Amino acid sequence: MGGDTGPTGPDLRMGVAEDRIPDGGMIEGHFDDEPVILVRKGARFYAVGARCTHYSGPLAEGLVVGDTVRCPWHHACFDLRTGRALGGPALAPIPGYQVERRLDLVVVTGHLKSEAPRAAETRPSHPGSIVIVGAGAAGTGAALTLRAEGYTGRLTLVDADASAPYDRPNLSKDYLTGSAPEEWLPLRPHEELIDANIRLVLGVPVLRIDPAARTVLLADGRAFPYDALLLATGAEAARLDLPGMDSPHVETLRSLADSRRIIARTADARRAVIIGAGFLGLEVAASLRQRGLEVHVAAPDQRPLEKVLGRELGLKVQRIHEEHGVAFHLGHVATAIGDTSVTLDDGSEIAADLVVVAAGARPRVALASRAGVVLARGIQVDQYLETSVRGIYAAGDVARWPEPRTGRTIGVEHWAFAMRQGQAAARNMLGARQSFAVVPFFWSQHYDLQISYVGHADQYDRLEIVPGLPPDQWEQHYLVGDTVVAVATIGRDRQSLEAEAIMERAQARQSGGYARPPAALR
């Protein structure tokens, strides 16, 4: 997942001519052996680390937006002034450096001093105690953001999963493939969270929430009082009402334990059937093919991913899988799972000694429901991510919030987006009162192909594919009227970042999209 080959570019201790860097541009160099980007914003220059702290993405190939720099791989966002991680999927900061101008040279002179505690920590309006239920992307992002914003009160992070917090997207991608070791999985080391004075309570489920007493009750009898509560309970894998669903060779994939069981089964399995042709199912198919298994995909869809990506891009993904040996059984529903096969609705059988059911996910709402929180196919929140019960917030896969463009209550169940919701909820728990208006982003990996998608287009009038691109590139725009509401790309990281930035500006104007593709995106 990335790696450095040694210092490149100019030695920034020696300086570079300021006219080498255009306004809004950057140059990569090094400070001693550390890769650094030097960025110009008008008359000001900033220097920060050149590698994203998520998967070491090359920030020099990213995009400067305001006082931030965005990673081209997965759109993490960092503050150019300090190096702070502002938006997921990165949680750790990049280094910041001191910059001086000497005549016509710009020189990096040393590391920035650590940030002083933020003034916000002294506000009497802050909750005395915060509990976060769920240590996934949203919950962990919220906890670290609270501390980064200067919150010094009691902070407890609870999860029934003893392995949390970990990088969930990896479970169907590199980790399942076998190319990512276990040490890549933790979102942040437990020691770092403990050093931040975050109390971790893992491996113990929450039994119930008492909103009147403002208390979270655990299954082991412990109780944690709260002044503010974040529900980041995520979603659970959907199960099918099929004969054989509970057989020992049938798996779903949602947790690290699930991924480990599937990997263990590949040691003896030769033939796998994936039920479901969505992103998760196809990523699992790719990973199991790379482990050498014969793989079949069965789904009721006529084309994989067509509902999300459109017909042409769905067909492109299908062809890539077929080129790698995956067999598709589309337009068919599984009716039974036997000991050695899966039966489809046309009576045909597919031999299988491993079955992975990837039939979607359901938000975990039981705790919220018992606490009297209003639900809407998930937990309904307002623009500040607060639920119907004062002092209780929700973020991530479980949350349903009012989309700025349409005002509809929607859910976006993507990992980086969940983290950004958790970060926004954290700031609002501290009194920021900032409407959540982040542009959704997700990526999906299929062998060497990465699809990047920005925006939200569960409904659109038409789809326009950019013509004349090289075979290894793809770009298409989803339009409502003449407004682009989403963009999907392959091999066009810069264009994906530019689309996200344009949508952010449009969102600030409350339109949520932009009129026709600008020249930079064609």
Image (spheres, rainbow, N blue to C red):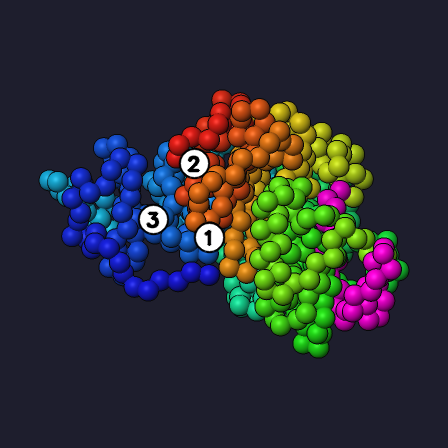
Measured along the vertical axis of the image, is residue 21 above or below residue 263? Answer: above
- Which range of residues does the magenta coloring cover? 336-365
Measured along the vertical axis of the image, is residue 61 above or below residue 32? Answer: above
Q: Distance between the residues labelled 2 and 3?
A: 22 Å
Q: Which element type, helix, strand or loop, lies under badge 1?
A: loop
- The outermost residue toward the front is 468
Q: Which of 276 and 481 is in front in this view?
A: 481
The residue under the point 27% across, 60% down is 7
- Whether residues under marks 3 and 1 lie with C-beta atoms below 8 angstroms apart, the answer is no
Q: Which of marks 2 and 3 is in front?
A: 2
Q: Nearer the viewer, residue 469 or 394?
A: 469
Tag shown at residue 87: none
Of the 4 image quadrants, the one containing the C terminus is top left
Residue at the disc numbered 3: 60
Name the amino acid, label 3.
Ala
Q: Which element type, helix, strand or loop, lies under badge 3?
A: helix
Measured along the vertical axis of the image, is residue 446 above or below residue 80? Answer: below
Name the amino acid, label 2.
Arg
Magenta segment: does it hold 344? yes
The residue under the point 61% across, 71% down is 291
For disc 1, the neighbor class at 10 Å (few under 14, some 14 to 19, many from 20) is few
Measured along the vertical axis of the image, is residue 485 above or below residue 89? Answer: above
Magenta segment: does it hold 508? no
Residue at the disc numbered 1: 472
For disc 2, the neighbor class at 10 Å (few under 14, some 14 to 19, many from 20) is some
For disc 3, the neighbor class at 10 Å (few under 14, some 14 to 19, many from 20) is many
522 with respect to 441 (left or right): left
- Whether residues under marks 2 and 3 lie with C-beta atoms below 8 angstroms apart, the answer is no
- The outermost residue toward the right is 243
- The percent position of residue 486, horizontal first and vertical second, equals 55, 35
The residue under the point 67% across, 58% down is 255
Residue at the disc numbered 2: 522
